[in-house]
Image (cartoon, rainbow, N blue to C red):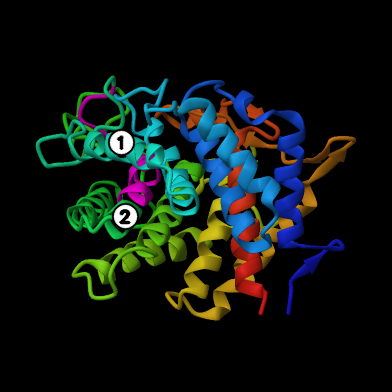
Amino acid sequence: MDLVYKDHTALEYAKMACDTLMKKFEAEDLPPKGRFHYHQGVFLSGMQKTYELCGEEKYYNYIKAWVDSIIDENGTITKFDKTQLDDMEPGVLLFMLYNKTGDERYKTALDTLLPLIKDFPKNPEGGFWHKGRYPQQMWLDGLYMAGPICSEYAKTFDKPEYFDLTAFQVLMMEEKTIDKDTGLWYHAWDYAKEQPWANPETGHSPEFWGRSIGWVPVAIFEDLGYFPDDYKDKPKMIDAATNLLKAVIKYQDSETGLWYQVVDKGDDKNNWLESSCTCLFVSAICRAVKEGYMDKSYLEYAKKGYEGIINRLKYDENGVIIDNICIGTGVGDYEHYLGRPTSANDLHGAGAFILMCVEVYKAFHE
């Protein structure tokens, strides 16, 4: 039975969001224009999953047009920052293009990106720096930026060392950022314990920022889609993601179904309900249930969160508007997160919305 809410299925909402952004931007103009970056990557990942469900070629053509605007005839990525995991993430789009076209440019680009990830700067315990300018710091976001591309590369090209790399980063991030009392994960961890935000004893940051936590189970379940069933650390990875989701569920707003910008402080009137983290949590819960990692009873939380987001949507002549999306942010204290501006239909917010709709459709559609 399809989940139809306010006259549309979840797949229809995914297509509406794709169509709205396609109307706003020619593929090559997606911001930041001309750069291989996760903003485009997460949006187009959602579009790719939408295409896989509906088969409408306009979505494939749009993805290909964006990739081809940045990868030249030799397979060179013309503009990306090798010091940021954020600029590795769009590589997930290259597998489908390579499989469908056989064009070696896409494999050449992948063969450029993956060694860069493998050799990315690491702290003395082996954890990826988040960016070159953030030495010794691990951020939750990095699991999404580097994990899925490594996992798919490992399976596609029989490079099992990338499974090991991905699993190691996940389990280390859990160890360094988990709060034993709540089960939530802090946004970041500083090996050096030198950052102004770092706890001087543990090195972790002080707050549970919604979207950073949302990337974690979304990334892990995407990783596990490529891992061998008998991989030694697969049960630990499943537990890491599902235990985090069970912790998150406790903080869902009972009235709206949404989650807060700072997840655990919903009783503060200055805290606010944020759309992108809600989308990521719903997406991950649906996938966990669909994969058999969590009981079907958890879909009630996903359904409530999904309906909460749909209730928030606005519409104009160009299509659907997804608002109350926190713009990108660094690591900081509570006031830092509360003070972040919001946007409407920015790419990582739209991407999170589309990913949610796809997973809701899969979980409820039979």
Q: Is residue 183 above or below residue 91?
A: below
Q: In the picture provided, is 256 more to the left or to the right than 203?
A: right
Which contiguous range is marked in magenta? 134-150
- Tag 2 secondary structure: helix
Q: Which residue sits at x=29%, y=74%?
A: 229
Q: In the picture provided, is 327 more to the left or to the right than 227?
A: right
Q: Nearer the viewer, mark 1 or mark 2?
A: 1
> Which residue is disc 2 drawn over?
151
Q: Are marks 1 and 2 in contact (CB under 8 Å)?
A: no
Q: Quadrant of the N terminus?
A: bottom right
- The amino acid on which the numbered mark 2 sits, given as a three-letter code, is Ser
- Tag 1 secondary structure: helix
Residue 257 percent across, percent down from the top left = 67, 58
The answer for how far apart the CA atoms under marks 1 and 2 are is 13 Å
Is residue 49 found inside the magenta-colored segment of the image?
no
Would residue 254 be seen by someone viewing this image from the given angle?
Answer: no
Residue 212 percent across, percent down from the top left = 44, 42
Q: Quadrant of the C terminus?
A: bottom right
Residue 30 percent across, percent down from the top left = 61, 27
Q: Which residue sits at x=63%, y=63%?
A: 53
> Which residue is disc 1 drawn over?
113
Specify the farthest residue to the right.
Answer: 317
Q: Is residue 155 above or below residue 351?
A: below
Residue 290 percent across, percent down from the top left = 52, 74
- The amino acid on which the numbered mark 1 sits, given as a three-letter code, is Leu
Q: Which residue sits at x=34%, y=33%?
A: 85
Is residue 144 found inside the magenta-colored segment of the image?
yes
Circle 1 residues within 10 Å: few <14, some 14–19, many ≥20: many
Q: In the picture provided, is 217 more to the left or to the right than 269?
A: left
Viewer-proximal residue among 276 and 364: 364
